[in-house]
Image (spheres, helix red, strand yellow):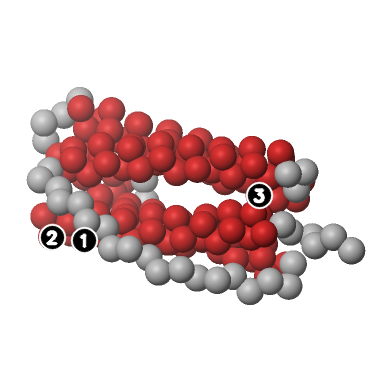
Amino acid sequence: MKDLLSKEAIADLEFRINQEEFSSRLYEDMSLWFEDKGYAGFAALYSKYAQEELTHAGWSKKFLLSFNLKPCLKAIPSPEAEYSSCMDILEATVDHEKLISEQCQAFAINALKRGEIMLHQLGLKYCSEQVEELDKAFSIRSMAKLTSDMLVLDNYIKENYL
């Protein structure tokens, strides 16, 4: 009998876990920068983002466990970015979400090419989530470009995004 998940599928799922957990670490690092600089709204938002990324990693963990496969957790590198302003972080967020979106599209496409329809459905779930995350990243960056007072934007973030 053919295995229900190919080795490539398992590798893709474990890569997705690693990338989502790295995203969590990255957003936690950004949250700490905001907290250190006194931007409580942004700090809380990025802490929320960090938790959401762990939820996304959980989707792939649960998928593997559903096939009676224990996920292999890889090491997560530390984020090595230095930020000099809120706008640096907002630009880095957009860039990161673009990268993750490309990965999620490749995940869905590869699953479909291999005929792994159940895995393709998970890939579509990741892609759908990326549309929301890109929208938030672009919107907040656009708002930041409209003001020179990041504390006002920080308060707006606290009132409207948390």
Q: Which residue has dot 2 on it?
A: 36
Q: Residue at x 35, y 43 (%)?
A: 96
Element under label 1?
A: helix
Element under label 2?
A: helix
Element under label 3?
A: helix
Task: Give the side of residue 138 with respect to residue 34, left or right.
Answer: right
Locate residue 52, reporting x and y percent: 45, 57
Task: Give the side of residue 136 with respect to residue 104, left or right.
Answer: left
Report the Cα–Cα distance between label 2 and label 3.
Answer: 37 Å
Is 35 drawn above or below residue 42 in the view shown? below
User: At label 3, which amino acid type do we have?
Assistant: Leu
Is 104 drawn above or below residue 72 in the view shown? above
The one nearer the camera, 130 or 76, is: 76
Q: Residue at x 56, y 40 (%)?
A: 106
User: At label 2, which amino acid type do we have?
Assistant: Asp
Locate residue 20, reporting x and y percent: 46, 56
Task: Give the side of residue 123 with respect to residue 145, left or right.
Answer: right
Q: Is residue 17 visible?
A: yes
User: At label 1, which amino acid type do we have?
Assistant: Leu
Which label number is shown at residue 32?
A: 1
Locate residue 143, reporting x and y percent: 26, 30
Neighbour class for label 2 at 10 Å: few (<14), some, many (≥20)? few
Q: Which residue has dot 3 on it?
A: 122
Pointers 1 and 2 in contact (C-beta within 8 Å): yes
Is 86 drawn above or below residue 77 in the view shown? above
Locate residue 70, reporting x and y percent: 63, 74
Neighbour class for label 3 at 10 Å: few (<14), some, many (≥20)? some
